Image (spheres, rainbow, N blue to C red):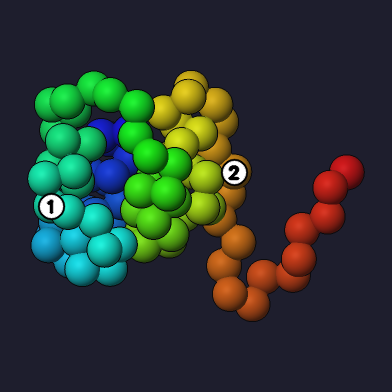
Amino acid sequence: MARVITDRLVVLGWRQWELVERAKVSQAIIRELQYDTNQRRRNPRTLEALSVALGLHPSHLEDVSMGLDPKPAQLPGDPPRTSS
C-alpha cells in the first residue's frame, strides 16, 4: 500500500498535505500508510476516502491491503462497466 500511495502522489504531482485536504484524512494516518510504520487494520472508509482522492477505484487500497488485485478506476466519461 505504501508504494501505491507514494507512486500515485508522484504521478499526480501532490504532496502529503494535498492528499490530507482532498481525502479529509489526518496526515498521521497517511504518513503511517505511506511509510508503513504502523501495520494495523485500517477502517475501510479511510482507505476508500484515500483511494477516491487519489483517483483510484474506491476499493483499491483495501484490495491491496488484503493482497487482492485492485479494480481499475472508472474515470468520468467512461462507459459503464458490465460484468461478463
Identity of the residue drawn at 17% across and 54% down = 26
Q: Is residue 21 left or right of residue 51?
A: left
Identity of the residue drawn at 39% across and 56% down = 49
Q: Is residue 71 above or below residue 42?
A: below
The residue type indicated by label 1 comes to Gln
Identity of the residue drawn at 77% across and 58% down = 81
Q: The residue tagged with tag 1: helix, strand or loop? A: helix
Q: Nearer the viewer, residue 2 or 44?
A: 44
Q: Nearer the viewer, residue 9 or 24?
A: 24
Q: Is residue 81 visible?
A: yes
In the rendered image, the residue lying farthest to the right is 84
Category of crowding for the residue at label 2, using alpha-carbon neighbours closer than 10 angstroms: few (below 14), some (14–19), many (at least 20): some
Q: Nearer the viewer, mark 1 or mark 2?
A: 1
The residue type indicated by label 2 comes to Lys
Q: Quadrant of the C terminus?
A: top right
Mark closer to the chain start, 1 or 2: 1
User: Which disc is residue 47 wearing?
Assistant: none
Q: Is residue 6 above or below residue 49?
A: above
User: Which disc is residue 27 wearing?
Assistant: 1
In the rendered image, the residue lying farthest to the bottom is 77
Q: Is residue 60 left or right of residue 79?
A: left
Identity of the residue drawn at 28% across and 68% down = 22
Residue wearing tag 2: 71
Q: Quadrant of the N terminus?
A: top left
Q: Nearer the viewer, residue 9 or 57?
A: 57
Point out residue 40 in the picture as x, y percentages from the top left corner.
Answer: 28, 24
Q: The residue tagged with tag 2: helix, strand or loop? A: loop
